[in-house]
Image (cartoon, rainbow, N blue to C red):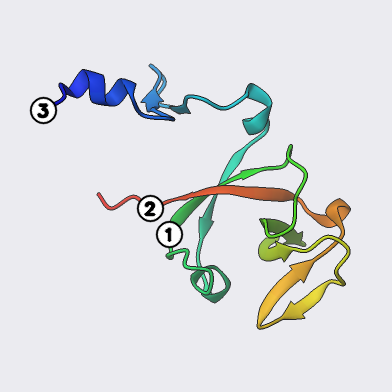
Amino acid sequence: MIPKAQRIKKLEHPILTNPNGSLLIEGYPENYFSGSFGLTAIGPHFRDRGIADNSVLMCSPALKPVDGDIVIVYDGEHPTLHVFRAGAAEGITDGKRTIGDPGKVDAVVLSSFNFYR
């Protein structure tokens, strides 16, 4: 059996905490997370994509979206979830919101976290 310390060192992106209680994910360039924020997922548009209610989405306004990215577009004060398709008209395709203008995207969803305890 591999000792616990060696198993942790083999992880591709260890998740650590700093003295302030912030989560740190190793292995990504600093600008990848520039201005990143968390967003609580609630509602059918999230569930339709397999994202459970109360999941925390890590979102980055610094990244440019690419085809297939799940992105956040603010409708007034409310975040809405879209699939980015370069050049596509904004609308609904197969019951899912799509957007094709990267200038209208407020953030790219990087990850979804579920906290069970």
* Residue highlighted by disc 1: 54
> Foreground mark, 3 or 2?
3
Front residue (pair 115, 29): 29
Q: How far apart are marks 2 and 1 (CA)?
A: 7 Å
Task: Tell me what residue is drawn at x 50 percent, y 66 percent.
Answer: 42
Residues at circles 2 and 1 in contact by the CB criterion of under 8 Å: yes
Which residue ends up furthest to the front in the rendered image? 1
Left or right: 96, with 41 as reference point: right
* Residue highlighted by disc 3: 1
Left or right: 101, with 71 as reference point: right
Q: Distance between the residues labelled 1 and 3?
A: 36 Å
Task: Tell me what residue is drawn at x 51 percent, y 55 percent.
Answer: 40
Q: Residue 83 carries which label?
A: none
Left or right: 11, with 93 as reference point: left
* Residue highlighted by disc 2: 114
Circle 1 packing at 10 Å, graded few (<14), some (14-19), many (20+), is some
Q: Is tag 2's residue or tag 1's residue first in the polypeptide sequence?
A: 1
Is residue 28 positioned above or below 44 on the image?
A: above
> Foreground mark, 1 or 3?
3
Q: Dot 3 lies on which element?
A: loop
The x, y position of residue 91, in whole percent, is 80, 77
Q: What residue type is labelled 3?
A: Met
The x, y position of residue 88, in whole percent, is 85, 69
Task: Tell me what residue is drawn at x 74 percent, y 37 percent.
Answer: 62
